[in-house]
Amino acid sequence: MEPMLSPADQSPPPVHVAIIMDGNGRWAKARGLPRTAGHKRGAEAVRRTVEAARELGVSYLTLYAFSSENWKRPAGEITDLMGLLRLYLRNEVNNLHKNGIRLKVIGDRARLGADIVRLIEDSEAKTAGNTALTLLLALSYGGRQEIVEAARTLARDVAEGRIAADAVDEDAITARLSTSGIPDPDLIIRTSGEQRISNFLLWQGAYAELVFMDTLWPDFGRDELEAAIRVFHGRDRRFGTAR
């Protein structure tokens, strides 16, 4: 007998899923563990979720790994997070490549260590030709800052005559974002029960469906991703038009 497909499998998946990974600290605190333990378990959830997204046919997966505001966290925690990032880039890229996954990193690289930037560049170059899934990691990323940087680039282009001021439109701004060439997210998921988007993909997420889940990020996996996709399929997406 053929296995029954879940509802998430019966309709085309959203092309682009974005996730605000929240709850590592609370997961650790509830177990009397240091926050670092939550971040390590969160890295395992990343692996599970990337694999599930590829298997479910999602084309783009964006993970909010470290926000521009996260730099305000205690120095020790930032050091631990950067150490985990180094491990991920060193240890996971071969697995991503083997599974046909392209890695792209968005965010302000100027604040990252030089060795991390080199790891990012090497990882992006190695996986550039892969087509099974594009994994975007948002590192040192902030949506407002991204829009400001796009506006600065556009202002320079106008000042230097590369584009007329009257020709500035949504497409002109979109083309200057770090996600240029990537379709806008169809679905944005946030874990841990918080219901806000925290400066994540502010421009790109204008018409995304938002799904807030109580699951803490270290406990997230295929079942939770499928549940969010089922909610997505139950929504009536009208993009501002009448029914």
Image: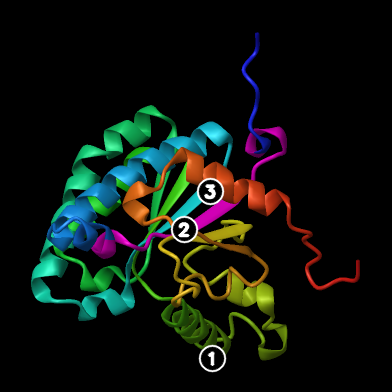
Asked if residue 16 can be seen in this view, the reply is yes
Could you tell me which quadrant the C terminus lies in?
A: bottom right
Which is more foreground, mark 1 or mark 2?
A: 2
With 115 as the anchor, is 58 left or right in this view? right
Residue topped by disc 3: 60
As measured in the structure, the alpha-carbon distance from the residue carrying label 1 to the one carrying label 3 is: 35 Å
The residue under the point 36% across, 55% down is 217
Q: Which residues are magenta?
A: 8-26
What's the residue type where badge 3 is placed?
Answer: Tyr
As measured in the structure, the alpha-carbon distance from the residue carrying label 3 to the one carrying label 2 is: 11 Å
As measured in the structure, the alpha-carbon distance from the residue carrying label 1 to the one carrying label 2 is: 37 Å
Which is more foreground, mark 1 or mark 3?
A: 3
Of helix, strand and loop, which one carries label 2? strand
Q: Are marks 3 and 2 in contact (CB under 8 Å)?
A: no
The x and y percentages for residue 187 are: 60, 57
Of all residues, the one furthest to the left in this rendering is 76
What's the residue type where badge 2 is placed?
Answer: Ile
| Sequence-wise first label, 1 or 2 | 2
Q: Is residue 156 magenta?
A: no
Q: Is residue 15 magenta?
A: yes
Tell me which colouring the rendered structure shows.
rainbow
Which is more foreground, mark 3 or mark 2?
A: 2
With 41 as the anchor, is 54 left or right in this view? right
* Viewer-closest of 45 and 3: 3
Q: Residue 161: which quarter of the image?
A: bottom right
Residue topped by disc 2: 19
* Viewer-closest of 92 and 196: 196
**Which mark, by number, is residue 202?**
none
With 18 as the anchor, is 112 left or right in this view? left
Label 1 crowd bin: few (<14), some (14–19), many (20+), radius 10 Å: few
- Residue 37, relative to residue 204: is it above or below? above
